[in-house]
Image (cartoon, rainbow, N blue to C red):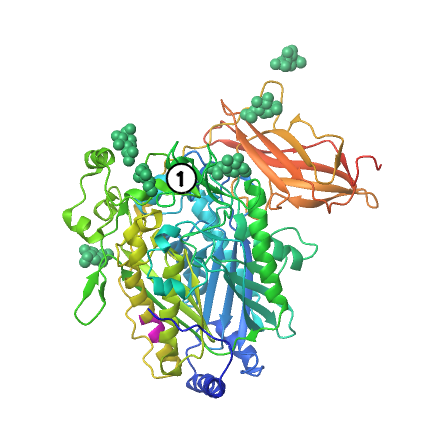
Amino acid sequence: MARKSVCCKLTSLEVTLIILFILMTGIAVGLMAILGLQMNSKENKVAEDLTSSVKPEENPYLIGMGRADCTGPVADIPLMGYANPDQTAGGIHTRLFSRAFIVDDGSKRVVFVSADIGMVSQRLRLEVLKALEVNYGNLYKQDNVVLSGTHTHSGPAGYFQYTLFMITSKGYVKSSIQALVNGIVKSIDEAHKNMRPGRIFLNKGNVLDSNLNRSPHSYMNNPEEERKSYKTNTDEQIVSLKFTDLDGDGLGIFSWFAVHPVSMNYTNHMVSSDNLGYASYLFEREKNIGSLPGKGPFVAAFPTSNSGDVSPNTRGPHCMNTGEKCDFVNSSCPIGGNKMCAAFGPGNDMFESTRIIGESIYSKAKELYGRTQQEVHGNVHYAHQWVNMTDVTVQLSSTHSVKTCKPALGHSFAAGTIDGGGDLNFTQGAIEGDPFWDGIRDALLGKPSQEIQDCQNPKPILFSTGEMNWPLPWHPEIVDVQIITIGPVAIVAVPGEVSTMSGRRIRQVVKQELETNNAFTNPEVIITGLCNIYTHYITTYEEYQVQRYEGASTIYGPHTLSAYIQHFRGLAKAIAEARTLLGKTGELSKGPEPPFFKDSQLISLVPAVPVDKTPTNTTFGEVLEQVNPIYKVGEVASVTFVAGNPRNSGDMRDKTFVTVEKFLTASSTWEVVHTDASWETRFHWIKGTGGQSNTTVEWHIPLSAETGTYRIRHFGHSKKFGFPSPVFTPYEGTSDTFRVTKTLYSF
Ligand SMILES: *[C@@H]1O[C@H](CO)[C@@H](O)[C@H](O)[C@H]1NC(C)=O
Ligand SMILES: *[C@@H]1O[C@H](CO)[C@@H](O)[C@H](O)[C@H]1NC(C)=O
Ligand SMILES: *[C@@H]1O[C@H](CO)[C@@H](O)[C@H](O)[C@H]1NC(C)=O
Ligand SMILES: *[C@@H]1O[C@H](CO)[C@@H](O)[C@H](O)[C@H]1NC(C)=O
Ligand SMILES: *[C@@H]1O[C@H](CO)[C@@H](O)[C@H](O)[C@H]1NC(C)=O
Ligand SMILES: *[C@@H]1O[C@H](CO)[C@@H](O)[C@H](O)[C@H]1NC(C)=O
């Protein structure tokens, strides 16, 4: 495939086209106003009034930004991502937030949400849409709302309705899904409430040394000519949308970058938003001066892009036992096999790695934010479809058509990746089954049908999930495909993890389609992964042939990407036609509605929290290990309390289990300087036996900390037996006061 490099110098023809396009946009906006396109809610009336007071070609948008805490239960719930049963929640490193923007062009509006979670599931999306319908009627619906997850691997699981994901989640966890639904809806409510006329700017740059292709062997199987048109085997590009009010004051920024948030590895138990979340944290801290983390009006989100084969562990894979390089083809080690091969870096531990990658992404976004940039003008559009992904026919040429398959996972799925290997003796790149495991599979789950084996070839099937329906289907058939556009910016919502090259192919096709009939001039196409429903990976046909982890996890077979490309092309075409007013919006079929398995909520394998016990002669909140009387900046203050299970505190969104407080001499009061949402604090919940547990709170005192007198506090609830229902009693614990100094000797 020959590719022309996209250039940046405009020819006079292009300039003419742009002017024409701006004129046409103006005419289109005017026409729509004359046609009085449906304004059926009170909110939209407000929108109309406000837009009519501003010049459309300069300030055509109404913009709202919102953020809300979506941190769910932080104890004894599996974390979603590594599918490692040992990795259960035990406290908080950083809180999880949902961040939303709403853009309205006076006639249409779109909502984009980026939440610090592993992925958006179908169940989560359906519940969010239901809640939005209750509050907003028809205003926010499946067509114009995109929900995406950053893909942190350190958020609570339990919000799925398909069996495979419920197994790793220990079923449906009500407290987990409720926190997510309420947090996401609240972020949209916030954005909705503060909508105001504003402007949008687009900017792009490169983030260097912050990602690495973790399956270069698969990537190398893509056609040479195609690879030659790209400098790197991951996308280094970061694309930002900056939102301001009419005075130019910043409201927020959304920046897309391709990296897996797996700087925190599977040995971590604290809930964490990982590297992309830390980039948000830094940006918001800088803009919301004087606010505690997660507070303040400025919203900075970092949704993930085509990150399917992209690791943040930039020192690359090594054998943990011998220090050797892992095998290139199958990422396994001579001793210990696949499990011993892991990627590390750039820091010396996972916290430092998270910090370095987060800072690097944040710094580039900040630079883009400050630079001159292209203002975004033009209408808002959206297109959405539900697709039966098990039943797509793709016409590759006039004589050759191919089909997608019923879902199945290959052997290499069980191998995991260099960011977290599986426990068993599977290796990546298996194109033949293993008689041992195939035997176990056949005995337990039944043999995959010949039809599915042929369709998925060369994938050796481990789980024929498309043929497994007990107690509920193991994998989805109906998935969402969706594109929203704001002026020349198109955001493609992909329902899974797209590999680098898959993302590039989708981008190229969508761009081409949008440019048809000059509907769009030089559109910027942004890929967002992990949107709306989770379907594992999407690799290219060529990468699929290699069957590393990503290929083995491309569940609808070798032509999965081609099927998505066909559908995204269709969506782009509909938008282009609507934009040139050729047409026929609404001609896209809605597609088959996804199922809502009410019964999934009956499946819960997370045991109820037992009653809490204290060690003899102690009380909840009592200090077991005291702080030191004095710390130097850069040191770690630590205190251990007798604790209850954090789940006994119920919904803790917008609250905190921990504070670090500074004594204000002038007023003789304590000021909260950190909460459990702070990067500097680590709230570890350590489960013991017989209902006993401890909380250890660490404060990693930054060099910038002011000298003074401090204390650390912990808040929780203990559970005791009661009739007819258990009794939850709040408790709190406070450390001794301690001094923080710049040098140990300066009192
Ligand atoms: C991994 O690949 C190497 C060759 O690249 C081979 O020697 C080794 O046997 C493979 N390991 C497995 C478990 O397939
Ligand atoms: C995870 O990170 C910690 C350091 O923070 C390290 O000790 C451990 O070996 C890492 N484990 C894996 C599997 O990467
Ligand atoms: C999806 O397509 C398959 C194959 O045609 C069909 O068996 C299945 O019923 C369809 N699923 C839904 C939910 O329509
Ligand atoms: C995995 O382990 C089983 C049992 O020890 C063995 O029979 C099988 O051959 C192993 N598979 C591979 C690929 O090493
Ligand atoms: C608990 O306190 C009582 C009364 O002060 C004392 O007699 C007992 O030895 C203590 N038990 C322990 C385990 O410290
Ligand atoms: C709680 O902390 C105390 C004091 O450090 C320790 O003796 C005990 O083993 C800890 N219990 C748990 C469950 O971690």
The residue that disc 1 covers is 421
Name the spot of residue 336 as percent of width and height, x first: 39, 32
State whether residue 555 appears in this view.
no
The magenta segment: 570-574
Q: Does the residue tagged 1 have its C-beta within 8 Å of any atom of ligand 2?
A: yes
* 491 w.r.t. 266: above or below: below
Name the spot of residue 729 as percent of width and height, x first: 57, 33
Q: Quadrant of residue 395?
A: bottom left
- State the quadrant of the N terminus: bottom left
- State the quadrant of the C terminus: top right
* 239 w.r.t. 25: above or below: above
Taking the image as shown, residue 152 lies to the left or right of residue 619, namely: left
Closest to the observer, 485 or 733? 485
Taking the image as shown, residue 626 lies to the left or right of residue 62, namely: right
Q: Secondary structure at mark 1?
A: strand
Please, what is the dominant secondary structure of the magenta stretch? Answer: helix
Closest to the observer, 702 or 10? 10
Name the spot of residue 150 as percent of width and height, x first: 47, 53
Q: Is residue 365 magenta?
A: no
Closest to the observer, 238 or 535? 238
Q: How many marks?
A: 1
State whether residue 354 appears in this view.
yes
- Crowding at label 1, few (<14), some or many (≥20) Cα neighbours within 10 Å? many
Residue type at mark 1: give it: Gly
Q: Is residue 571 magenta?
A: yes
